[in-house]
Amino acid sequence: MDGSTITLTTDFGETDPYVASMKGVLTKLAPGVPVLDLSHAIPPQEVFEAALFLAGCVPWFPAETVHVVVVDPGVGTERMPIAVRWRGQLLVGPDNGVFTMLARKAPFEGIRRIEHPECRMEPVSATFHGRDVFAPTGAKLAMGMPFEAIGAAVADPVMLSVPEPKRLGNVITGEVIHIDRFGNTITNISDDDIKISNTYVVTVGSHSITGIMRTYGEAPQGAPLALIGSGGLLEIAVNQGNAHRALGLNRGMPVYVET
Amino acid sequence: MDGSTITLTTDFGETDPYVASMKGVLTKLAPGVPVLDLSHAIPPQEVFEAALFLAGCVPWFPAETVHVVVVDPGVGTERMPIAVRWRGQLLVGPDNGVFTMLARKAPFEGIRRIEHPECRMEPVSATFHGRDVFAPTGAKLAMGMPFEAIGAAVADPVMLSVPEPKRLGNVITGEVIHIDRFGNTITNISDDDIKISNTYVVTVGSHSITGIMRTYGEAPQGAPLALIGSGGLLEIAVNQGNAHRALGLNRGMPVYVET
Amino acid sequence: MDGSTITLTTDFGETDPYVASMKGVLTKLAPGVPVLDLSHAIPPQEVFEAALFLAGCVPWFPAETVHVVVVDPGVGTERMPIAVRWRGQLLVGPDNGVFTMLARKAPFEGIRRIEHPECRMEPVSATFHGRDVFAPTGAKLAMGMPFEAIGAAVADPVMLSVPEPKRLGNVITGEVIHIDRFGNTITNISDDDIKISNTYVVTVGSHSITGIMRTYGEAPQGAPLALIGSGGLLEIAVNQGNAHRALGLNRGMPVYVET
């Protein structure tokens, strides 16, 4: 796998030496392989947020990329360490559902339990598998260890139960699943469910918005609008403003689209 | 352009998959080219802050570096996507004035509208040109696409209007343009206007400081001082303290230097 | 030193161009050498936090790695710029004790004052040695300048005084030295002092915890527990919670272990 890249996605933040020690392990075990930070700001122990994050970025990487993912509230318990193959890329992390949203885009091409003795830094700590299991496994895969050598096949990985939009008559009911840095409020209603339209009405909290637009600038500055965002999901935004704060929107709030 | 490096400067933060998906595009289209994060913490949609940031760091990079810059409140509107050449480096981003402060240091050596069909990921979303236009353009430039091939020359790029210090008699009036992480309060008065001196008096808010020093440690611990910072601009600081908080200084406040 | 890597650890944050301009210098002076961010979120001017951080991650890197460290409240004063060799790795930074916790793990293999004229960007500013001294020195070392060429040997580097745990009878008294992102509360009592045990009693603030466990999941969800963390230090945590907030724990609080 010459030409591979290793990426890191964690909830570790930057104030502790956790990410840095993983980078040490990667530098030692995969010399010359580029390491890219995807995010270390996943909210602590929020597996669903991490699953959503990965679905938003992993599809843009080329085959052979190795993603090391550590959002791992169950570290040291019975949860398995796994690696999965997805569209020719490899992802390494805990078997806690963190790959759920990717699996909904395309099926896994393989799932393995991490067992190979070279896929660990001995002694393996009970509290930091990012450094002691996931980073070494990512390094070995990037250096050419065959995926199948990692360990036994896993038939039944953990999957998160994901809130699904529902259609009743001409109304689709979904919910807010993520607030982004700009306060854009992202829902679980996708461009499979709806389309750009002048007549759809989107209701969330006490706000109703008529029309689904193409881009932020189509609404007057400071006005709320609905659009289909860059990830293909319905999003409520305020042109050059913050919908989360201006409209009081939060994760989990129901969203209705009248079509 | 073998040996090139691509850098990223955005207001995207780390909690969303925006930066990560740009890194995916770069990894795919510019394999083997190193990618460096400059900042993803530009305040959301603050084009002037981004312009200031770039002027503070881009001059230190070597020729051939490709900088991808995405602080883009007007995404999806009529604002053009452009690339500029500056001291042999290349910068890619929206035509919204984000390169203004660099242009004041040295003239652009070329400005092109991004039009080449290879400089985009189809379908181009209306809300995320960072991923769909600017990252692919940066990748192509780093892989050797000639600057002139990007698109038509642009004669008249958008420039921000920048607050200028004014001199009246022996008083220079400027303003606070940036507060840094340490609370150091940076003004638009530069070392072209003033020099290190024992007798100059700097006034901001209700505080007057006599003398312009060479470094923080020349003032007693906890005392306010004025100095010429590492970017060549007059700065009000507190030795081992936070001038922003201790002195109540904020962006936009007027600053007077009596020479 | 072909195959070297340069890392960066600073208290500069991401909102200012300080880190980015250091990356410019490294890109210019050490072309082709990978640059890894370790952290830019060391609390401003907190030398002890930086020393702790380095001890937590540097041991995981291979020999030949060059670490550039800038937590430097005394910049521009008489404090020396130095480079140290530690287990075959090289560290560059201010002589203010920032390498203290590494020195306690293994002795320095050499300490040099930075004097070589190539180890600076002229003119050297009085306020930003990260860009003007430490980055160029790191670049030169990564490009093969011999460690001994940097400057004169230093006999007596600054060392921080570090709080030590004390044993009186069957009670060990230590203190909280760091709170991590998850609210885990890390003490200066190490696995040299204590072991995993069902009978030890750990007291901090108004809380007493019986037993020292192996991992977070051994306590009921939301319950406080004591364990030996991945860095070998006694840690008070809450399973899937935040001990810092839930138990009101802070840096400097005394911790008692009854053995």
Image (tube, coloured by chain):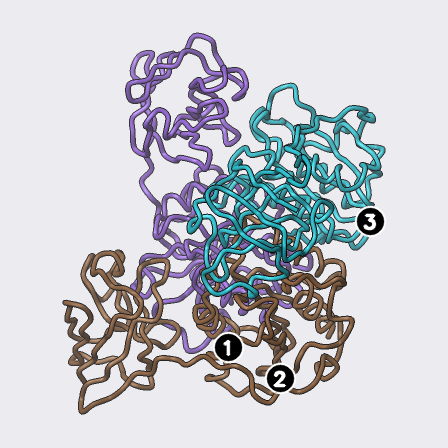
Chain colours: A cyan, B brown, C purple
Chain letter for mark 3: A
Chain letter for mark 2: B
Residue at which label 3 appears: A1
Image-based side of C3 in relation to A107, left or right: left
| Residues packed near mark 1 inside 10 Å, few (<14), some (14 to 19) or many (20 plus) | some
Report the residue at 66% width, 61% height from top: B131
Q: Does C26 appear above or below A97?
A: below
- The amino acid sitting under disc 1 is Gly
- The amino acid sitting under disc 3 is Met
- The amino acid sitting under disc 2 is Ile
| Residues packed near mark 3 inside 10 Å, few (<14), some (14 to 19) or many (20 plus) | few
Name the foreground residue: C148 vs B14: B14
Image-based side of A123 in relation to C169, left or right: right
Name the foreground residue: B52 vs B71: B71
Mark number, residue B111: 2
> Regarding mark 3 in the picture, which secondary structure is present there?
loop
Residue at which label 1 appears: B97
Q: Quadrant of residue B74?
A: bottom right
Image spot of residue A118 (x, y percent): 75, 33
Q: Is residue C77 in view?
A: yes
Q: Does B30 appear above or below B257?
A: above
